[in-house]
Image (cartoon, rainbow, N blue to C red):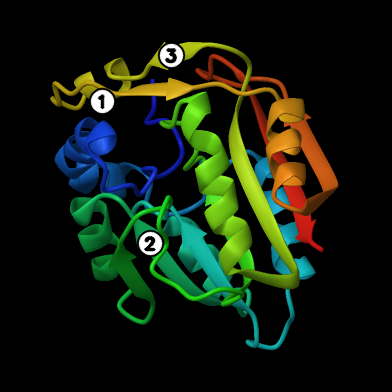
């Protein structure tokens, strides 16, 4: 069993205190086990590439990696010419991100109250960073992402596709960590509805089967701000 992909939901509210503790606890092993995108499914990386292609080229694009974790997707996007800012709930994960990517900017912050002005970014990446937030909290996350996205900018969201809640603590137990961590599954149509509700137009969708030790299908949606 491998670590599940993604970052933490970057909220500082009490409801996420356990998630923050969990990622602080596993941060160093997470960074060592997933140092880059070698373990990523080719279809997932194809969606990341489509996102990078959708924002302006030539180093002009400002991209927010929201729920950046240890910064591996921030690095991937930076190597494709994006000016990346990463934000994450977990100070431990941010420490790992800064250590691995001293040339990039990272901050501890909240997805539900992003510390950036309106229309700041050409792109927002939510790569498995919505998965620890229950359905009631999803509208706020997408509203904040839309707020900081400029008109014509693009958002990419990745998540496990399905229904219900999964206990993912066991993925970390084999590395010696006794934590409590759950994730929520969502259908692609559910996420598309959230995007539409905040004025984002879906332009591409990918849903792939589970592979290797994965339990659920994986999905990603690319959307454009109107």
Residue 26, percent from left and from top: 20, 38
Q: Residues within 10 Å of mark 3 (few under 14, many from 20)?
A: some
Residue 47 to residue 21: above or below = below
Locate residue 9: give its quadrant. top left
Residue 7, percent from left and from top: 40, 45
Which residue was labeled with disc 2?
Answer: 87
Locate residue 96: give its quadrant. bottom left
Q: Provide the secondary structure element on which disc 3 rests.
A: strand
Residue 158, percent from left and from top: 61, 41
1 and 2 marks in contact (CB < 8 Å): no
The dot on residue 93 is none
Pair 3/1: label in front: 3
Going from the N terminus, do you reach mark 1 or mark 2 first?
2
> Is residue 144 found left or right of 224 in the rendered image?
left
Residue 101, percent from left and from top: 34, 72
Q: Residues within 10 Å of mark 1 (few under 14, many from 20)?
A: many
Query: What separation in Å lies between label 1 and label 2 (alpha carbons)?
Result: 23 Å
Quarter that holds the C terminus: bottom right
User: Which is more toward the observer, 1 or 56?
Assistant: 56
Residue 174 appears in view = no
Which residue was labeled with disc 1?
Answer: 172
Going from the N terminus, do you reach mark 2 or mark 3 first?
2
Q: Provide the secondary structure element on which disc 1 rests.
A: helix
Query: What separation in Å lies between label 2 and label 3 (alpha carbons)?
Result: 25 Å
Q: Provide the secondary structure element on which disc 2 rests.
A: strand
Pair 1/2: label in front: 2
User: Which is more toward the observer, 94 or 174?
Assistant: 94
Which residue was labeled with disc 3?
Answer: 166
């Amino acid at each position: 069993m491998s670590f599940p992909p993604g970052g933490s939901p970057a909220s500082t509210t009490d409801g996420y205190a356990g998630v923050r503790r969990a990622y602080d606890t596993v941060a160093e092993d997470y960074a060592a086990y997933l140092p880059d995108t070698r373990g990523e499914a080719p279809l997932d990386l194809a969606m990341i590439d489509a996102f990078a292609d959708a924002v302006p080229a030539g180093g002009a694009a400002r991209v927010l990696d929201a729920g950046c974790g240890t910064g591996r997707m921030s690095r991937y996007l930076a190597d494709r010419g994006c000016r990346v800012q990463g934000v994450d709930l977990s100070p431990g994960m941010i420490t790992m991100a800064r250590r691995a990517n001293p040339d990039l900017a990272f901050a501890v912050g909240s997805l539900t109250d992003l510390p950036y002005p309106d229309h700041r970014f050409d792109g927002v990446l939510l790569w498995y960073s919505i998965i620890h937030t229950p359905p009631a909290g999803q509208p706020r996350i997408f509203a904040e992402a839309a707020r900081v996205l400029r008109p014509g900018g693009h958002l990419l969201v990745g998540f496990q596709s399905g229904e219900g809640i999964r206990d993912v603590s066991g993925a970390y137990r084999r590395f010696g960590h006794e934590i409590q961590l759950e994730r929520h599954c969502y259908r692609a149509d559910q996420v598309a509805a959230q995007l539409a509700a905040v004025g984002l137009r879906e332009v591409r969708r990918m849903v792939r089967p589970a592979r290797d030790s994965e339990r659920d299908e994986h999905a990603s949606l690319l959307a454009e701000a109107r």
